[in-house]
Image: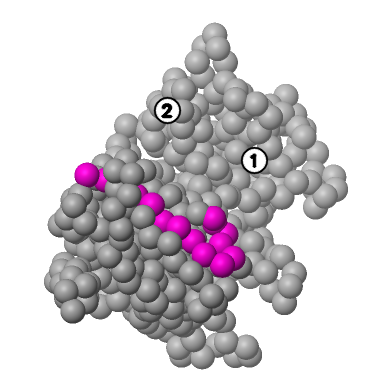
Amino acid sequence: MKKLLLVLTTGLLIIQLQAQSTDSVSMGGGSTTYPLDVYYNITTGAKDTARNTNWHIAFSVRNAQPPMNVLLAATVRINMARGVTVYKSTQGPASWNNFDTTNWRNWTLVRDSDTSWDIGALNQGRTNGFDFGWGDYSMNTHHIDGKVIYLFAIRNGANTVYKKLMINQLTLDTTWNFTFANLNNTDSNYVSFNKAAFTGKMFACYNILNKTMVDREPARANWDILFTRYHAKVNYLGVDTFYNVTGALINPENVMAARVSGVNRDSANRYMVTAYSSLINTIGWDWKVSPMGPPTLSWPIVDSLTYFIKKGNLIYKLLFDRFDANPNMIVFNKSSIDVTSVSETSNAFARVLAYPNPAKTDVTIEVTTAANNALLSIVDITGKTVYEINMESADGGFRAKIYTDSMGKGIYFYNVETPNGMVTGKFIVE
């Protein structure tokens, strides 16, 4: 009874720390598919909405952080999900006036990365640390000088507009300079802008057809998740293809994310997370299922996908509830846990072992800690507690040997709780 009481008390503590709420974002509707981006702050629920149909190319306005993360300062992305297709030629600045588009359909088609904000379409094809795809860094001038002419095919209503574009230079990590024109050299435009005009943002955007800068983003410190339309690799009927999808991308400067799959979402808990990721598509688009045939008002939601968002001392559990097609509405449920309020400091444990792992007939779990007692609980992939025991004192800590005969094959998670803190891990039964 004492053991059961301790488990229930711990469970109640965690429940009391959870703040549950239902929220939603609207990405618009009408003749244009999902025409709005929504920048979402998971802590405050604040939403910044921006059109995603009024720009073609985006330039990073962040600053270099040598020797790490230098690429983020020279990133150039495109709005491929909104009809921008870009081909990389083998021609450089000297060929600008005589740009040869023969066999352009056989040129390299470049795409933005959907796992990192720092790798844009025009950064593809890098060969070394001084190569940024569209240009090379000069050790003498400290500029990045353009070296490639790109062919832009921009969908404009029922038509496609073709432009040639070259980034002339990123000057001292402060000023972007680029040129674009019609293929016959008419309507030539030289554009220069300073990063400082967009301080705190991630990208400054440009509309090539309207010849205007577009300041569309909130400060990157103010948003955690972007609900947007983007281009991604999709496996459809066993074949990998690129497709425009609607989903959620994270801001890794503020949050990290993890997904727990194959578990009923009501049973999933944060102890099932093996690692948090900074890949921007960790949430992604596949939490919903595209209906076969004509679009329906509401798409089916995958009931075995749960997301956990880590932001500072808070961990959010994110569940998608609904995805409506037109007008688009995404409804989700979030709950938060303040991990500093649950005694869970890894410093309380000098060593944690689970062996053998994978296990066949038994698994031994050992912890080295100065605490005077330790409670072990084992949870299966559905979130059900299958084993509980007070661990035995051993070698400056505690040990428990668990026989796995009745547990069945699969992944299991263990929680060791002491008065000094809590530690979690996982093992596999073969």
Which residues are the magenta region? Answer: 356-370
Distance, label 2 to label 1, CA atoms, is 18 Å
Residue 370 lies in what quarter of the image? Answer: top left
Q: Is residue 325 left or right of residue 368?
A: right
Going from N to C along the chain, the mark reached first, 2 or 1, is 2
| Residue 364 sits inside the magenta stretch | yes
Q: Position of residue 372 (x, y in %)?
A: 18, 52
At x 51% / y 71%, what residue is drawn? 404
Q: Name the quadrant of the N terminus.
A: bottom left
At x 36% / y 55%, what residue is drawn? 399
Residue 402 numbered tag: none
Contact check, label 2 and label 1, Cβ < 8 Å:
no
The local crowd at label 2, few if under 14, some if 14 to 19, many if 20 or more residues have their Cα within 10 Å, is some
Q: Position of residue 424 (x, y in %)?
A: 35, 57
Q: Position of residue 354 (x, y in %)?
A: 46, 54
Type of the residue with mark 1: Gln
The residue to which callout 2 is attached is: 64
- Residues 197 and 117: in front is 117
- Residues 258 and 5: in front is 5
Q: Position of residue 288 (x, y in %)?
A: 50, 78
Position of residue 28 relative to residue 140, above or below, is below
Q: Is residue 234 left or right of residue 8?
A: right
Q: Is residue 286 visible?
A: no
